[in-house]
Amino acid sequence: MKKLISIVILLTFILACNKQEDFSPKSIKQISALYQPDLRPLSELRLALSKTVASGLNDSKFREYIQKTSRANTTRGFNEILLEVHKRDIIKDNLSLEAFLKQHVPSDAKEIFGDSLFHFLYRDDPCVVIKIPDIFYDYKWDIHRVNPMVYAGVPSEILNPPYFAFHASGYQEEFIDTWFPTHFYITVKLSEDYSLYDINTWNNEKNINLDEVLPQAFVGGCWDKLEEIISKSGIAYGNDPNRKYIHRFKAFEIWREHCSYKGPLLMNNPCGKPNLRDCVGPGESKLILKSYKVHNEILFLLANNKFGDSFFWYCNFLNKLTGESTLTCLPAIRYINLNTRKVILKEKFVTKNFECIGKVLIPSMEIDYGKNDQINEIEIGMEVVSSFDETHKNFSSYYCVFNDLVKLPQIPHVPFQMSATIYVPEQRDAVGYSDTPPLIYSIASDIYFVY
């Protein structure tokens, strides 16, 4: 009789853990089988790290570390925790981040990687990060009460593949990526801010050369001034002196500081009056891409990019007479930096009781967006040509992302390609520079030009 009761209890336990409508856990091998064969090794690494991070979040010291490190020295967005750079950070009891996480590697990850998960991450996924999405910047995370989900940002060639979210309790959830995530979560994914560059060739870990990320740095003799400065700005990759993590937007800021346009039209030189730009004739005029500004918040719902926080913006200037084109790029712009949307967050936590893992507080959220009329502007300072004929200029602009799968930028959307006639003021020497902004012409695309 006792044996029968034990069997019934065991069957009840098994059935409870496999209720299809509530909770049907899958192993890493079962999940990775959903993806293309050539993507499974990297998918298994991301899934294994995601489950490891989720398990580690059971410890409040780890939650405290994630919160503190993510917010350190930031204003509106969260820092990426680049695993290879932060692996020696102390979590608790003199345990480094790597040593702490090694204690939480799940059994299905060990079946694949043995005790070498972090060796394979270092070798095959050197730019993997742990990241709180920027949309949660104003959310008050109570680290003593709330355990976030961990989303595995696995590579995929499918537009909307299944994704998996893991929880410290052992609960997991399969979902399809949407514009509006339904949890408070952390992601494990490819870095959006950093690439790992060989500073001899300036190719990164995906064999993408820096001239595709920052093309304006390689024209007009600028690179000779920039190469050493950008190299020094990088973070060392282990003991390899030839490889460094380069923050892509910081590389842009270095270019802007040392090579952006500083010509006569942006200086207060002799016009006979203070605070006026030079008296420059039309034949000597310069066309400058002054700044980038976005009014339409819909641009930031174009593509989630596997729970991404940033995008790349390119603008190409073509002289149709000569066929000469000049390309400029703003790499890794954080959506939050342009301030085009208000994120509206509301806790909708759900408590579920599973016999196999007990009671679980699932951090469900209601996330919506509203328009923010206080638009920010990113300065560029790009000199395009030494003179221009307004009837022969063509401007095209597009947004793109770098992801796990490609050697070139992937362009998910081309919002505009246009020809534009630039207005030439008759009294350009009478434009006040310090008291009023430079004369700007706004194309419908919200790109601003000044000359």
Image: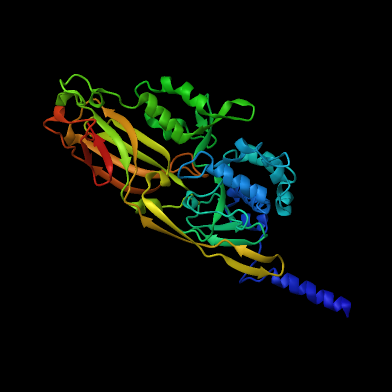
Q: Is residue 388 above or below residue 179?
A: above
Q: In this view, does 171 lie above or below 224?
A: below
The coloring applied to the image is: rainbow
The x and y percentages for residue 155 are 54, 49
Q: Nearer the viewer, residue 207 or 298?
A: 298
Q: In this view, does 266 lie above or below 29?
A: above
Image check: 5 left or right of 28?
right
Kindly identify the residue that appears in the image at 34 percent across and 22 percent down. Answer: 220
Image quadrant in which you'd find residue 5:
bottom right
The x and y percentages for residue 366 are 48, 62
The x and y percentages for residue 32 are 62, 54
Image quadrant in which you'd find residue 219:
top left
Q: Which residue lies furthest to the bottom in this view?
A: 1
Kindly identify the residue that appears in the image at 64 percent across and 64 percent down. Answer: 360
**Do we see residue 129 in this rendering?**
no
Looking at the rendered image, the quarter that the C terminus falls into is top left
**Do we see residue 416 in this rendering?**
yes
Q: Which residue lies furthest to the left in this view?
A: 426
Q: Which of 263 and 197 is in front in this view?
A: 263
Looking at the rendered image, the quarter that the N terminus falls into is bottom right
Image check: 86 left or right of 296?
right
Image quadrant in which you'd find residue 123:
top right
The x and y percentages for residue 227 are 46, 23
